């Protein structure tokens, strides 16, 4: 029962620091505009800086000890939006801040060969009859959230059934590391984690 990804709904790279000073002495606003692109829109407050590309392809959010680099439109193929390039540039922009972790986030809408609500209940609900008796109601859908660790990387997987055979899957891969890898390695890892995400969906749901 192979899983077919229909669209990549969301993509994000998040950088986490021990602290992040947004003051002008620590973050060069002109350099931020250069990274975001000519005519970028920038909203600057004491608690958050938000910069959006003129094409609205990518948005940058700096605040709450984090830099979030997020794609603003769905895409069919991984790699159309080069988030890892912006991650490197923005990490250099705040070079005085101490990086403590970074993460990749993916959200997809996919389709399976069977009805998703029934399949999720069968896979993730040990005893539907007992649960419905205890609830005094009928289970309409099951939305599993699975947190697991592989080597040194922590993962958070959320599966949400939709209508008919469709479902939405979101994955966070969290790396507790104090430096970003070189650009080519970051790109390789980002794409590799996405491929593994799709393979994971097939292993968990497509058996």
Image (cartoon, rainbow, N blue to C red):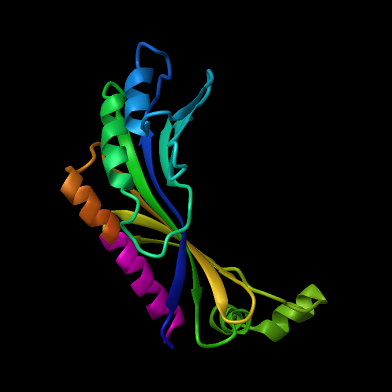
From this viewpoint, is residue 66 visible? yes
Compared to residue 30, the image places residue 100 above or below, namely below
- Left-right relation of 178 to 115: left
> Residue 89: x and y, percent?
27, 33
Question: Which residue occupies 78% across, 81% down?
Answer: 133
Choose between 103 and 137: the one closer to the eye.
103
Q: Quick one: quadrant of the N terminus?
A: bottom left
> Residue 131: x and y, percent?
71, 78
Compared to residue 168, the image places residue 79 above or below, namely above
* Numbered range of the magenta stretch: 192-207
Question: Which residue occupies 50% across, 66% down?
Answer: 169
> Residue 42: x and y, percent?
48, 26
Question: Which residue occupies 72% across, 77% down?
Answer: 139
> Residue 158: x and y, percent?
51, 63
Q: Quick one: quadrant of the C terminus?
A: bottom left
Magenta segment includes 199: yes
Choose between 138 and 133: the one closer to the eye.
138
- Left-right relation of 51 to 142: left
Query: Could you tell me what secondary structure mostly forms the magenta stretch?
Result: helix
Magenta segment includes 77: no
- Left-right relation of 186 to 75: left
Q: Quadrant of residue 153?
A: bottom left
Q: Quadrant of residue 125?
A: bottom right
From this viewpoint, is residue 27 visible? no
- Left-right relation of 205 to 91: right
């Amino acid at each position: 029962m192979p899983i077919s990804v229909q669209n990549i709904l969301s993509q994000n790279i998040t950088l986490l620091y021990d602290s992040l000073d947004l003051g002008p002495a620590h973050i060069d606003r002109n350099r931020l505009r250069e990274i975001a692109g000519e005519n970028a829109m920038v909203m600057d407050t004491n608690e958050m800086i938000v910069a959006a590309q003129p094409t609205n392809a990518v948005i940058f959010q700096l605040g709450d000890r984090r830099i979030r680099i997020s794609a603003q439109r769905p895409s069919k193929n991984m790699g159309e939006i080069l988030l890892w390039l912006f991650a490197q540039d923005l990490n250099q922009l705040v070079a005085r801040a101490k990086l403590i972790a970074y993460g990749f986030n993916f959200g997809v809408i996919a389709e399976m060969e069977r009805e998703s609500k029934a399949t999720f209940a069968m896979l993730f609900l040990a005893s539907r009859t007992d649960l419905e008796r205890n609830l005094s109601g009928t289970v309409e859908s099951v939305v599993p959230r699975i947190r697991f660790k592989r080597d040194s990387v922590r993962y958070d997987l959320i599966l949400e059934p939709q209508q008919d055979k469709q479902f939405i899957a979101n994955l966070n891969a969290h790396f507790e590391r104090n430096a970003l890898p070189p650009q080519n390695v970051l790109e390789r890892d980002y794409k590799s984690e996405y491929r593994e995400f799709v393979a994971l969906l097939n292993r968990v749901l497509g058996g």
